[in-house]
Amino acid sequence: MLFSTSWQRSPLKRCNIFQRELCSAEPRSSKNCIRLPSRESSALKLQNPSIESGRGKFHCKVSPFDVHGAEYSSNDPHNNIHDKLNGASTTNGARDVGQEAATPFDLEVGTPTLNLEEGLFTSSRAISLDEVLAAIRQLEKREQSVRDQNEEILKRLREAAKSLATHEGPEILKEVHELERAFSSYDHPTDVESETVENSSEHPGVLCNTRSGVSFDEANKTVTVSMQTSVSCAGDECSLELLQMDDFAAVASQVLAKSASKLARKTGHQLRGVDEDHSEIHASYLDVLKHGTIISAKPTEHESEYGHPSYSVVLRHPDTGRELEAIFKPAVEGDGDGWHRPVMEWVAYELNRMLGMDYIPPVAYRTGGVDVDFQHYEEGAFILFANNCRELREAPSGTRGIPLERLLSDTRVLDTLLHNSDRHHGHFLHGEHWSLRDLEGNPMYRPVLIDHAAGFRAEAHVTMSHENAFQTGPVKRISARTYLKLRFLDVKGIAQHFRGVLTEKEMVELLGRRNQVLAYLDDLVETQGYSATVAEYP
């Protein structure tokens, strides 16, 4: 059984909070109470509470949410609603730990009293859970307001201290910096998204409490990730002494490993996924490319030297009426011996977005039959047409929009991953970009990479050290963003995006090439130094 929750600054003192029983002070009395658990009671006994005649047991089940709320308030001596919260833990106690709720009820209680010797809490007024939660929210808002005011005051005091320190000498300034570091490391409560507390029973007789937190110090460019697991025995197993302290340490280490893996997946989600820049613009293009009706079509003017067909088409969205010009590349039998796999156009586009790039126009791949220019094809790629393009080498260097060094580095990374050996000058274009606009709303001109249908060809051999079409030599510098994105291009991300399109063998090979690219770049950092290898391009 696993209880897991996340909340703001809600210390959970002991795992045995889940052991509360609902009972009556006397079996035939209308008064009700909460009996606090003994240390020996098992945390798992709450699973199926039931009515027992003459013993005052209550028939409903209590959710961990309700018990957390009661614990949050009852442990705070400065909270003037802690009595209500203890009452609310019974008032809303009809929800099952296993998600299914029983019929809600109100509990008639009187003035709250607490008998610590007998472990009883009694009250006789009906308290609604909504009232309690509203009070909690109000207190949290007040607390946040006070904290914000303190932050602003401290910020201004630090600025004043810095100003004064510049006139007093470097020793005083050093003390100010030390105070700033001490303040930034102060244990500020983190919000619900950056701190979690999880309680679990990993093994019979063992209860685990794991707290994970992420704190940010913008001033010093520091992020601190902290994780702590406390393990204790529970129930009859405590008296048997069958588990040693080393056993607890082993369980705690296993729980920490699981929690660290979960946190890594959560924090790395954005780096592993498709880049969010201009995502809405891309989605609008893809909607037409996926669903648009072909209203005109003709063979492209540029005929493939291998005779592979392609068409210039105009698509109209059936609902919005939006029209786009696109290139349609149908799949052909045999894939042109590996030189014409239109689905690779889609793979290249997706990979370019996963690495934070936007060099390849949006691509949608359709299956289930496509009729174009009186020809029927089973499937094919629809590629957004980039307007007013010419070869990149014809564009003056000051008009390219990004440094050539960055473009060639990023392109080599892409081609190495794609195993694409077909990158000549005709595939480096310069034209209107689909996502970027100037202040007046006009399209900006940027490099455009095209023709990736030869990707993943078995006979190809592409590495980071190969020469490029511009004859500038092997890659010696890399974009900081591309470098980091590569680090998070892992098995899970590749499988989620490309399973069903790439074979298992091709996905394994893609991961292997990713490792080779990282090894090449890591070696450059080792030999050249970080600043000479990693660039923060504009």
Image (tube, rainbow, N blue to C red):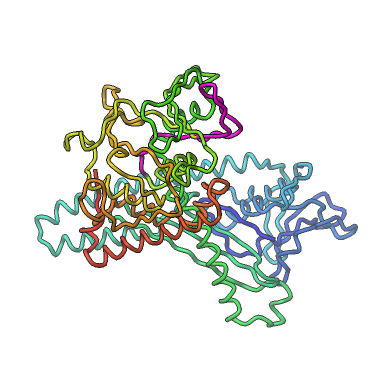
Residue 300 as seen in the image, left or right of residue 96: left
| Residue 189 appears in view | no
Q: Nearer the viewer, residue 50 or 300?
A: 300
Residue 283 as seen in the image, left or right of residue 28: left
Give the magenta range: 357-380
Percent across and percent down for residue 366 are 55, 33
Residue 27 as seen in the image, left or right of residue 45: right
Q: Quarter of the image containing the N terminus?
A: bottom right
Tally of marks? 0
Residue at 21% of width from left, 58% of height from top? 531
Q: Is residue 252 above or below residue 213?
A: below
Q: Nearer the viewer, residue 134 or 201?
A: 201
Q: Nearer the viewer, residue 255 or 185?
A: 255
Q: Is residue 431 above or below residue 473?
A: above
| Residue 60 appears in view | yes
Percent across and percent down for residue 441 are 30, 23
Residue at 39% of width from left, 44% of height from top? 352
Of all residues, the one furthest to the right in this rendering is: 53
Q: Is residue 46 above or below residue 110?
A: below
Percent across and percent down for residue 17 are 65, 61
Percent across and percent down for residue 474 are 25, 56
Residue 234 as seen in the image, left or right of residue 253: right
Q: Quarter of the image containing the C terminus?
A: top left
The magenta stretch spans residue 374:
yes
| Secondary structure mostly seen in the magenta stretch | strand
Residue at 49% of width from left, 45% of height from top? 140
Q: Is residue 517 above or below residue 243?
A: above
Residue at 57% of width from left, 58% of height from top? 75
The magenta stretch spans residue 287:
no
